Image: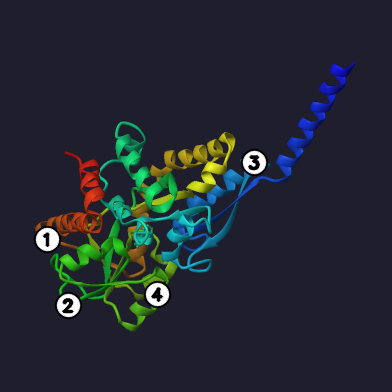
Amino acid sequence: MTVRFSAALSCALLVFAGAEAAAQPMMLKGVSAVPEKTLYSLKFERFVDEVNAKGKGLIEIRYLGGAPKVMGIFEIGRNLKEGVVDIANLTNAFYTNVMPEADAWKLLEYSFAELRGSHKKALDYMQAIYRERMNSILLGQQYESHSFHIYLNKPIQRADLTGLKIRVSPVYRAMVEALGGTAVTTAPADAYTMLERGTVDGYGWPLQGIFDFSWQKVTKFRVEPPIYRGEMSILVNLTTWNKMNDAQRKLLQDAALALEANDLDDAKSHADERKRQADAGIQALQLPPDEAKKWIEVSRVAGWAGVLKASPQHGAVLKDLFTKK
Ligand code: 173
């Protein structure tokens, strides 16, 4: 009798505990580096929807939106570190102020799939830096087939930016300066007015995404070839991560891995984007072969010099881990 009673009671308690858990999922505050519904937020927004649909009662990402509406783009890294936000869709350029080594992502010569598999030591090394500098972990990375361009309003024929002022994020600073240009670092939101007023002669941005900011209206040329490697990473505050249970962590990790697995579907979108820009009047400025080679080589050499200067010890290890022999 007693046994049966206590079994019934504990059963009721379990149901009650379950109901309580269902009523109070763990709440994560999420932000994106770029405005809501623009290209580089889309995959993260899909991820948020998936986590929230599958995570009912377990976890909920409250998506606050993107920079600059919710916070300045260069503040997201620090806010993530301090736990003001729990999860962020962010690219390296915008948090080098907290983690200078993140700049090395643009120089990675391996695929992210390789970093998940045979070349895991490179990801492990970066994860240790995320913990140390950002109190964060890198949950997943996307858009790695997206590379960068310099867009100009004055034509060039050679790998030379002498006399030109270029609006940059930290991604392009070293290469612009190495090619003789003047680099002005600003948030993306400031670029339109600077271009319209002619305070800058150009800017750096990935191949895709310029229509999100209407920059096609103030852009004449896109320099070819592309340089570097793009990425958007989903980063999670480590203190928050450590508070989660296994089921919560698994849900987030699985959703991020699924996102990575579907990341390389956009080769056609690059061709479509070149056509869209041409239709909008942006002329592709193809550098001649020797100059194109120099453009890429200077970017690479200046890029690594920048990483090494900002972080000599980690930089040297990263250069070794990120470069194919
Ligand atoms: O500043 C940038 O151009 C940049 O680093 C970036 C990377 C990915 C998406 C959008 C911008």
Q: How many marks?
A: 4
How far apart are labels 2 and 1 at the CA level? 18 Å
How far apart are labels 4 and 2 at the CA level? 21 Å
Note whether 188 is above or below 104 in the view shown: below
x, y (%) of residue 110?
A: 27, 41
> Of marks 1 and 3, which one's residue comes earlier in the chain?
3
> Of marks 3 and 2, which one's residue comes earlier in the chain?
3
How far apart are labels 1 and 3 at the CA level? 55 Å
Location of ligand 1 given as a quarter of the image: bottom left
As shown in the figure, which amino acid type bears the numbered disc 4? Answer: Asp
How far apart are labels 1 and 4 at the CA level? 30 Å
Contact between marks 1 and 4 (CB within 8 A): the answer is no
Judging by the rendered image, the residue that carries numbered circle 4 is: 190
User: Does label 2 point to a residue whose CB lies under 8 Å from ligand 1?
Assistant: no
Viewport quadrant of the N terminus: top right
Contact between marks 4 and 3 (CB within 8 A): the answer is no
Viewport quadrant of the C terminus: top left
How far apart are labels 3 and 2 at the CA level? 56 Å
The residue sitting at 46% across, 38% down in the picture is: 257
- Whether residue 309 is visible: yes
